[in-house]
Image (tube, rainbow, N blue to C red):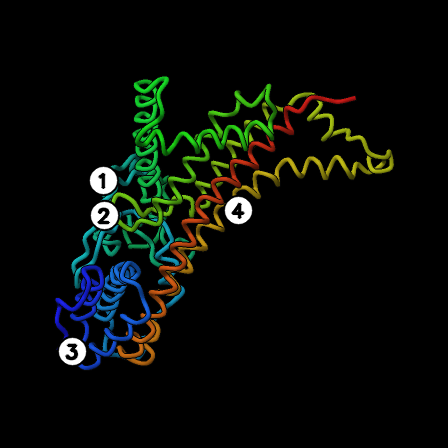
């Protein structure tokens, strides 16, 4: 028999999580011996947390399955998209058929009933209608709140200003940024002339890095201070949003930068600042670049290319950040969904077997996502600084 005292503390936690899932003690003890030989204790505690989460999710999924063959088909694509998409409530956990979630404010304006304010809990997890409003589950309006007529048919799509999970995540991230930098500011003021300590010691090198390695070289010594507040804000907002999106614990876990509307707004900030900061030499190089005359007349080929670049630059910023951040979440969701897929196709034993591989690669992708979070924050900030530098560069004859 396996004795609990035979295991180190971290390994013990992992084994106790698995022990509840195996009725065959001989099979369980065999797995214990294999894991002891292969994996270190610190890795096993992370693996145990992921395993518990996935096994629990698998049980929830199994309870939703019916006895018919058609209902047992697992929709992998739908599972992945629901995992990375926005929502009108903040789901915390699911135990059996009980769903624990935090309702969010729904703010709608209808041409017939005017403004409507209520909590998303009125929709009862998206299955009910309230005040002739309902969350569509299929068709072109899938996931949107639609307005119904007296016959229960879709009559209109109201103006939706609701606080979704992404918006709530943005608010949480902004409050977190305020707390971090107000703490850093107080610490810097208190320790003036002294070596930085605590959170100031953590943040100060990053701030200096953005200033000395990003802003100064790309914008210039004379002009960088004008843009530095924005560059620091955009860097830390993206970084905090990326990192908090990897922590599946309320009030964190919202995939803010995996929402293209958010990255579009961030790119628009860069576009607007670049456009209004551009000097006459910047605009001259766009509309009348120094190229051979035949590239400008009679067909303004180069001016068209340059003008197109003005709009493609922020577009690339938007797509790059969105694609990189949502890709990591989708890959993890795919690995997790493989457990449900194999369990549905070949039974629970296949699901348990695949879960070991799925959990391992999920942990690996999470660690990789942490690196990507820093890289994407740096790239977005660097490219924004480059655009500012190009817009304000002085003409050299």
* Residue name at image x 63 percent, y 24 percent: 392
> Closer to the N terminus: mark 2 or mark 3?
3
Where residue 12 sits, quadrant-wise, is bottom left
Q: Can you see residue 110?
A: no
Residue marked by disc 1? 118
Residue marked by disc 2? 130
Quote the CA–CA distance across marks 2 and 3. Answer: 46 Å
Verify CB contact (< 8 Å) between mark 2 and mark 3: no
* Residue name at image x 73 percent, y 29 percent: 285
x and y, in percent, of residue 165 in the image: 31, 44
The mark lying in front, picked from 2 and 3, is 3
Residue marked by disc 3? 23
Residue placed most toward the observer, 41 or 217: 41
The mark lying in front, picked from 4 and 3, is 3
Residue placed most toward the observer, 64 or 222: 222
Q: Is 334 rendered above or below residue 287? A: below
Residue marked by disc 4? 319
The mark lying in front, picked from 1 and 4, is 4
């Amino acid at each position: 028999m396996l004795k609990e005292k035979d295991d180190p503390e971290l390994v013990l936690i992992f084994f106790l999580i698995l022990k509840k899932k195996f009725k065959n003690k001989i099979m369980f003890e065999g797995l214990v011996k294999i894991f002891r030989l292969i994996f270190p204790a610190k890795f096993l505690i992370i693996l145990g947390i992921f395993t518990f989460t996935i096994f629990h999710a698998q049980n929830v999924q199994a309870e939703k399955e019916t006895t018919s063959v058609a209902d047992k088909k697992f929709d992998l694509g739908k599972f992945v998209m629901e995992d990375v998409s926005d929502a009108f409530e903040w789901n915390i956990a699911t135990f059996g058929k009980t769903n624990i979630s935090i309702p969010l404010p729904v703010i709608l304006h209808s041409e017939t009933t005017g403004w409507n304010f209520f909590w998303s809990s009125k929709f009862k997890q998206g299955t009910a209608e309230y005040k002739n409003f309902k969350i569509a589950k299929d068709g072109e309006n899938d996931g949107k709140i639609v307005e119904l007529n007296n016959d229960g048919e879709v009559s209109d799509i109201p103006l939706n200003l609701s606080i979704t999970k992404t918006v709530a995540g943005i608010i949480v991230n902004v409050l977190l940024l305020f707390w971090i930098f107000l703490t850093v500011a107080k610490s810097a003021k208190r320790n003036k002339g002294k070596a930085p300590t605590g959170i100031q010691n953590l943040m100060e090198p990053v701030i200096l890095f953005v200033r000395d390695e990003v802003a100064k070289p790309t914008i210039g010594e004379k002009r960088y201070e004008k843009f530095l507040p924005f560059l620091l804000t955009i860097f830390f907002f993206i970084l905090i949003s990326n990192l908090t999106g990897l922590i599946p614990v309320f009030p964190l876990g919202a995939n803010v930068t995996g929402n293209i509307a958010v990255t579009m707004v961030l790119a628009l900030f860069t576009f607007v600042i670049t456009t209004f900061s551009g000097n006459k030499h910047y605009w001259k190089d766009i509309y009348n670049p120094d190229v051979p005359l035949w590239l400008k007349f009679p067909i303004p080929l180069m001016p068209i290319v340059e003008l197109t670049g003005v709009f493609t630059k922020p577009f690339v910023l938007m797509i790059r950040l969105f694609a990189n951040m949502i890709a990591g979440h989708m890959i993890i969701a795919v690995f997790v969904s493989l457990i449900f897929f194999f369990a549905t196709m070949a039974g629970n034993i296949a699901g348990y077997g695949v879960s070991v591989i799925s959990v391992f690669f999920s942990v690996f992708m999470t660690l990789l996502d942490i690196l990507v979070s820093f890289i994407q924050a740096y790239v977005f900030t660097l490219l924004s600084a480059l655009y500012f530098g190009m817009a304000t560069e002085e003409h050299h004859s």
